[in-house]
Amino acid sequence: MVLHKHGERLYNGLKQVVTEHLEDKIRKDVVASLNNNFLDTLNAAWNDHQTSMVMIRDILMYMDRVYVQQNGVDNVYNLGLILFRDKVVRYGNIRDHLCQTLLSLVRKERRGEVVDRMAIRNACQMLVILGIDSRHVYEEDFERPFLEESAEFYKMEGQKFLAENSASIYIQKVETRINEESERAKHYLDPSTEESVVKVVEEELIRKHMKTIVDMENSGVIHMLKHDKIEDLARMYRLFYRVKEGLKTVCDCMRGYLREQGKAVVVDEESETARNPISCIQNLLELKDRFDHFLHNGFSSDRLFKQAIGSEFEYFLNLNGKSPEFLSLFIDDKLKKGVKGYSEQEVEVVLDKCMVLFRFLQEKDVFERYYKQHLAKRLLLQKSVSDDSEKNMISKLKTECGCQFTSKLEGMFKDMTVSHTTNEEFRQHLSNSQINLLGVDLIVRVLTTGFWPTQSGNHKCNVPPQAQHAFDCFKRFYLGNHSGRQLTLQPQLGTAELNATFPPVKKEGASLGQRKHIFQMSSYQMCILMLFNSQERWTYEDILQQTLIPERDLNRALQSLACGKATQRVLSKEPKGKDITATDVFSVNDLFTSKLHRVKIQTVLAKGESEPERKETRTKVDEDRKHEIEAAIVRIMKARKKRPHNLLVAEVTEQLKARFLPSPQVIKKRIEGLIEREYLARTPEDRKVYLYVA
C-alpha cells in the first residue's frame, strides 16, 4: 500500500483500529476494575498493548521507514504509546485514580505494611515510557503529587518525632527514613526521583528543625559532647552534612560549648586550675585531646570543625596574659628529672602537644623570654631529664619560628659545654700550681651575657669567705686566659654541698649520737647556714643584713630550712609557724635526724612569677618589641621607599604576627620615633604617606 501511494490510508487505518480496540475493550476493562484489582488490570493491559505494538511495528516496518519518515508523523510504536496514554491512562478519572492508588501504596509501605512493589514499579515504568523521550507524563501524573504528599507526610512526622524523642533517637529515625526512601526509589521509582524525594525528607526532617535538634536540652549536641556520644555525633554530622548551613549549625553549637569549657580552664578566677600553671596547661591539653577525638571520630576531620577548634583555642588561650609563662612552666615541669610515670617517649608526645598550644599563642616573644629563664635553671641546676629532650624541644621551636628564635637557647647549651672544658682546665691548673681552695671544691659555669636571661635587681650577696676565696682563684685563672672579659658572680642560680656535723644530744629520754650529713642546697641556703658556725641564734633582720640576699629569695630559702619536711628541717624557728616574718629568730635544729647521709634540701618553688617580677618581665618584653617593630618598619620602608600609613601598619603587623600582635597605636608611636630620628619623613603633599630617608 505504501508502494502504491496509500501510506496515509494505511497509517490512519492503523490509528483507527488501535483507538477502537483501546476504547471498546481495554478502557472498559480498566474502568470496571477501578474499585477492584485496578493496578493489576492496568499493568496487564499495558503489557499486552506493548507486545501487540511491537508485533505491528515489525509487520509495518516499511511504512515506518518510508511514509513516517517522509511525512514527519509518529512512528508505529510511538503512535501506540500516544493512543494508550490519551485513550486509557489519561482518560477521565483513570488518571487521578492511578495517581491516588500509587500514593496510597507508598503511604501504606511507609507505615510498615507490605505492598506489591512490582506492580508499583511496572506502573511507574509505564508512565516514563509513555513520555516518549521525556519525563513529563511521569512527572505530571505521579512524581509531582508524590513529592508534595511526601513533604506533607514528613512535615507531620517531623513534628511528631520531635515531640516524642530525644535528639539521639530523632536523628536515628531520620537516618532510617532517608535510607528507606532511597531504597524505595531504587526499587520501584524512576532513578531520578531518588534525589528529589531524599531532598524532601532532608528539608522536612532536618533543615526545618536544625536549631531545635542541635539545641535540644539533655540530648542535643552539647549533651553528646559532654557524654562522649561519638556515634550520635557522627550520625548528626552525616545528616547535617546533607543540608545547607547544617554543618555550620552543629559547628556553632560545638564552638560555644568549647569556648565555655576553655574559659573555665583559663580565666575562671575562682578556679584553682586557672591559677596553677601545670593544672591549667594539663587541662587545656586534655581539652584539646577531647575535641580532637570528636573532630576525627565524630566530625570526619572536617575542615570547618578543625578551624573552629583552632580559633577557639587561640581565643581563650590568649585571654589570660599568663598563658605564655604557664606553657613554659608546664614544659619545664615535663623536662625536669624525676617526672614520675613518664618515659622519654611519653615526654616527647607531651611536648608535641605543647607545640600545638604554642602555635595558638599570640605573644610568642613572651613565651621565649620565660622559656629562656626556665631552661637556664634546668641547665644550671642540672635538672634536665636529658640533653636530647632539651635539644629536641629547641629543634621544634626552631622549625616553628626560625633560628632567630632559638639562637640564644642554642648559645646556652654551648656555654655549658665550654664550661665543662674550662673546669677541667682549672682543676689541672690547681694541681700544677698547688693552690689551696681551703677545702672548697669549686665548679663554675661561665655564661655569656647575651645568651642567658638577666634579671634586674641586686643579686649580690655576701658569700662566705672560703667560697669567695675559691671564686677569686678561679677568676684570676679565667681572666689570665681570657683578657678583656669580665666575670660577675650570680649566686641566685648556684648550688652547694655542705658537710654538717651535729653533736650528741638527748631526745625524749633517748640519746642521739654525733650525726654527719652532706646537705645539697642552693647557694643562698649555704650562705645562711654558714652563719651558724659563728653564733647559735640569728634574727631574720640580722640574716638579711649579713647575707644581703633579696627578701623574696631569703624567705624561700628560710622556709625550706625551717618550715619544710621534718627530714629537711635543719633550722628551728621561733615562734613556730609555716610563714617567715621579720621578727622570727632562727637556730640550728640540734634534734635533726635523717636516715640518709646525703640530704637534699628542697627549695620552696614559686608557681610562676610574683606580680613585681611579672611587671618587670612585661617591661623588658615591651622594650624588646620597640626594637623589633622599628626594625620591621625600616625593612619595609627600605624595600618600598614610599608607603601610606595604613598599608605600612598592615605590613608590619603581618611581618611580626608570628612573634606577637603589635597594636596600631604602638606601631604609630614607633613610626613617629623613626621620623624624629630622621630614618623616615612625611611627604609634603600628604602627612599620612611616609618616605624612607637613606
Image (cartoon, grey):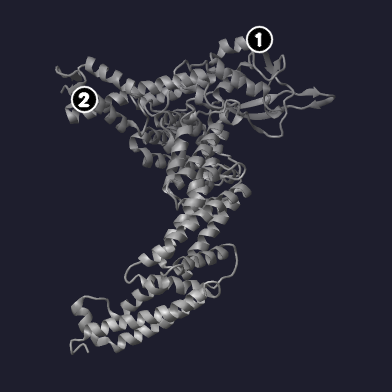
Asked whether 47 or 539 is in front, the reply is 47
- Image coordinates of residue 639 in percent, x first then y, are 19, 31
Q: In this image, 608 relative to 22: left or right?
A: right
- Based on the displayed image, in which of its 4 quarters is residue 271 positioned? top right
> Where is the C terminus found, in terms of image quarters?
top left
Q: Position of residue 372 (x, y in %)?
A: 44, 31
Under tag 2, what secondary structure? Answer: strand
* Tag of residue 392: none
Amino acid tagged 1: Thr
Q: Are marks 2 and 1 in contact (CB under 8 Å)?
A: no
Residue 384's x, y, as percent?
A: 51, 38
Type of the residue with mark 2: Pro
Q: Earlier in the sequence, mark 2 or mark 1?
A: 1
Q: Quadrant of residue 454?
A: top left
Residue carrying label 2: 644
Q: CA distance from mark 2 to mark 1?
A: 64 Å
Position of residue 286 in the picture relative to residue 197 (left or right):
right
Quadrant for the N terminus in the image: bottom left
Vertical placement of residue 362 versus 148, above or below: above
Q: Is residue 376 visible?
A: no
Q: Secondary structure at mark 1?
A: loop
**Residue in the foreground of this view, choosing between 203 and 179:** 203
The reply, left or right, for residue 331 in relation to residue 217 is: left
Residue at 51%, 54% in the rendered image: 152
> Which residue sits at x=47%, y=72%?
121
Disc 1 residue crowd, few under 14, some 14–19, many 20+, Cα 10 Å? few
Query: Against 693, is 95 above or below?
Result: below
Q: Where does label 1 land, which residue?
A: 583
Label 2: few (<14), some (14–19) or many (≥20) C-alpha neighbours in 10 Å? some
- Above/below status of 452 relative to 584: below
Residue 422: x and y, percent? 41, 32
Circle nearer the viewer, 2 or 1: 2
